[in-house]
Amino acid sequence: MSTSTWTLVVGGVAGAVLAIFGASMLITGRAPQATARAFRSLRDAGFYHLLFGVGLGLVSIGTALDNPVVTMTVTILAVAMVGVALVRFRPRARRREHQVGK
C-alpha cells in the first residue's frame, strides 16, 4: 500500500471510531467523566464527536473517489458538518479555579 492509501485508511478508521463514540454517547446517555466535564451537556458531547467522525470519514472517502465533482461535494458536506460541530456543539471554556474579586 502506498502512503496516501494508508493515510486514507487511518483517517477513515479514526472517523469511524469518533462517530461510534459519539453515537454510543447519544444512545446510552453515558460518557467518560473527562468528556462529560468538557461539554455543557452529554448531547453536545455526543453530537460533537459524531459530526467530527462522520466529517473525517467523508473526507477520507471523498479523497479516494476519482470524480472531482463528487469529491468536492462530499468535501463541502464534510466541512459543513465539522463547522456545525465547532460552532453549535463545541466544548465549553474552562473556568478559573480562583476568580478575581471573590
Image (spheres, helix red, strand yellow):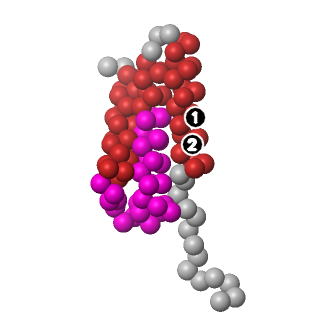
Q: Is residue 31 magenta?
A: yes
User: Does residue 14 show up?
Assistant: no
Residue at image coords 56%, 68% = 94
Q: How many marks?
A: 2
- Residue 10 to residue 4: above or below: below
Q: Which range of residues does the magenta coloring cover?
A: 28-56
What residue is disc 1 on?
A: 80
Q: Is residue 86 magenta?
A: no
Q: Magenta span: helix, strand or loop, mainly? A: helix
Callout 2: SS? helix
Query: Within the image, what quadrant is residue 83 found in?
Result: top right
Residue at image coords 44%, 66% = 37
- Residue 65 to residue 6: above or below: above
- Residue 2 to residue 78: above or below: above
In this view, the residue farthest toward the top is: 67
Query: Within the image, what quadrant is residue 43 found in?
Result: bottom left
Q: Nearer the viewer, residue 58 or 60?
A: 58
Spatial CA distance of label 1 from label 2 is 6 Å
What residue is disc 2 on?
A: 84
Q: Mark 1 belongs to which amino acid?
A: Ala
Callout 1–callout 2 Cβ contact below 8 Å: yes
- Return the x and y of residue 77 as percentages of the image width and height: 54, 29
Q: Quadrant of the N terminus?
A: top left
Residue at image coords 47%, 21% = 63
Q: Nearer the viewer, residue 58 or 40?
A: 40
Crowd class of label 2 (few under 14; some 14 to 19; many from 20; radius 10 Å): some
